[in-house]
Image (cartoon, helix red, strand yellow):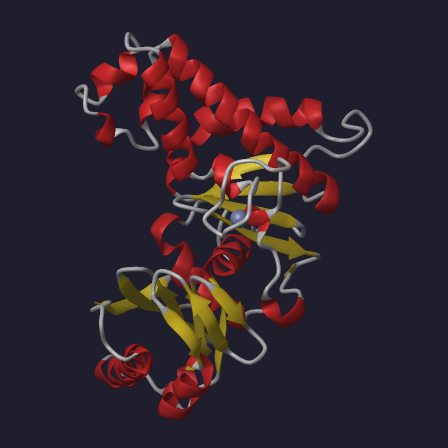
Amino acid sequence: MNYIGIDVGGTSIKGGFVSESGEILHRFGFPIEKGLPQEEYINRLADLINEEIVKNDYRKSDFAGVGIGCPGSIDSELGVCDYSNNLQWYGLPVVSIIEKRTGMPCRITNDANAAMAGEAKFGVGKNYRNLVLLTLGTGVGGGVYIDNHLYGGNKGKGAELGHTIIAMDGEPCSCGLKGCLEAYASVSALIRQTKKAMEKDKNSLMWDYVAYDIDRVDGKTAFECAKQNDKTALEVVDQYEDYLTIGLVNFSNIFRPEAIILGGGLSNQREYLTDALAEKLKAAQYGYRHTPKVELFVSELGNDAGILGAAALFID
Ligand SMILES: [Zn+2]
């Protein structure tokens, strides 16, 4: 049996026909043109799915269904995108539109939950039964996999791990609250921390790295200069990892997963990130001498995690 996986992003909708073993057999998609009525994006997606099936000599019965990963607050039970900040979608009944127009079953979840399902079924998490995934990007997304199943919670709204609070009255978060993990451990937060440290140390190598233009600071600036042993960059990275570790410790203590997977832009730092975090995590979690170790990995599926994870919504 094959699956159709759809990855809704801020700038494009990407889709793929996915085999049982997680191979993407065929890709399709279209850019998001702002300003269309919200239903139009889903109508267009449904029509494209119908066309691609015919054009590539498949039949609808070759597919178990259409899985969709979508940013924002998703009601997986009703199949509705209740609210997506960057797409400006409100109460969009995605599943009923797709089912009506394609005649195929459809399931939808939050994009981080989809990435979790993808890593668990096809990626670095495939040999584990209990997993946590954090995506470190503009925000911090979270997904939880318990006893071989994606955890959804009430209406599938579960696992907003980025908005667990790590500091009372702390830094303001994009969600309107204060002190969320996202406000400390997202790439946006790292950029803010990097700029602040650079303002204090005009001799840091980081100035050289961004050609003395502070607007060019990105998620790599502190990491790349820390690798060159710049003292201020090392401090930024160390502090950033301390913040992230608070989240990792909390999720380890709540779920006791076999592994935590880090995705998103920052996961490109690979072992440079996970080795330091593993040390910090080991020392900080409850009863570490007497409880099983929590492995730390970076995402294996990269840009395909969204398509594969959405497809995996149809694999039990
Ligand atoms: Zn928040």
In the picture shown, does residue 104 fall above or below 313?
Answer: below
The quadrant of the rendering that contains the C terminus is: bottom right
State left or right for residue 218 relative to residue 211.
right
State which quadrant residue 91 falls in: bottom left
Q: Nearer the viewer, residue 305 or 255?
A: 255
Question: Who's the residue at 59% across and 27% down the image?
Answer: 278
Horizontal and vertical percent position of residue 201: 34, 11
Query: How many marks on residues?
Result: 0
State left or right for residue 185 relative to residue 224.
right
Q: Nearer the viewer, residue 311 or 203?
A: 203
In the picture shown, does residue 225 fall above or below 248?
Answer: above
State left or right for residue 202 relative to residue 297.
left
Question: Who's the residue at 54% across and 47% down the image?
Answer: 162
Q: Nearer the viewer, residue 171 or 303?
A: 171
State which quadrant residue 203 falls in: top left
State which quadrant residue 286 falls in: top right
Horizontal and vertical percent position of residue 8: 36, 65
Horizontal and vertical percent position of residue 310: 45, 66
Question: Who's the residue at 75% across and 34% down the image?
Answer: 292
Asked if one can make out residue 22 in the rendered structure from this viewpoint, the answer is: no
In the picture shown, does residue 160 fall above or below 170?
Answer: below
Question: Who's the residue at 49% across and 41% down the image?
Answer: 172
Asked if one can make out residue 111 in the rendered structure from this viewpoint, the answer is: yes
Horizontal and vertical percent position of residue 63: 43, 80
Residue found farthest to the front: 169
